[in-house]
Amino acid sequence: MNPKRLPILIIIIAILLYIAYNYLPVKNTETKNPNKNTFIGNWVGDKYENNSYVTWIQKRLSDGTYTIFFVTIKGDTIIRDIETGKWWIKDGKYYEISPNANTEPSIYDYKIITNDSIMFSSASSDYKFVDKRIEENNFDSTLIIEPSKTINNTEKEIKIKYDKFE
């Protein structure tokens, strides 16, 4: 090879690499999913199951992390729980994993009902629920919910800062 042509060959290779890196489509379905932005934001949902009422508020961030605040009411017992983890969309399914709650991701089929409402169906059970979008300023993990339980002989009260949702 002629040593005078080496700089030209290096320039051509550099141009081809630049074009390939910046202009060819990415095959990774997780990062190029057109629906991903629909899932980002603050969501609220609830479900009756196993004689319990469960309600939650979830914040999904664009970096693929989430935080969920759960309140479960079963009889006279109120359980509060906070879960953090990672979420992603791949091959038309929604995945969620929390290292504190599970070792394998929960996998859901989903249907986008509107930009503010998504129905989820577990891929491994009959569990279904709907998340509804709430405004950004309604999710403040330090203020959003401070449940307490007051039980009198005939009265139960759950004090939740609902004014944050008005």
Image (cartoon, rainbow, N blue to C red):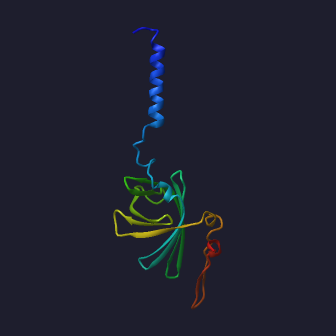
Residue 83, position in %: x, y?
52, 61
Residue at 38% x, 69% y is 127
Q: Quadrant of the N terminus?
A: top left
Residue at 48% x, 24% y is 14
Q: Is residue 35 above or below residue 77?
A: above
Q: Quadrant of the C terminus?
A: bottom right
Residue 148, position in %: x, y?
61, 76
Q: Is residue 106 above or below residue 24?
A: below
| Drawn side of residue 166 relative to residue 107, left or right | right
- Write down the quadrant of residue 158 in the picture: bottom right
How many numbered discs?
0
43 or 106, which lies in front? 43
Residue at 62% x, 67% y is 138
Q: Is residue 151 above or below residue 28?
A: below
Residue at 42% x, 58% y is 94
Residue 134, position in %: x, y?
57, 67
| Drawn side of residue 124 relative to residue 22, left or right | left
Residue 3, position in %: x, y?
45, 8
78 or 113, which lies in front? 113
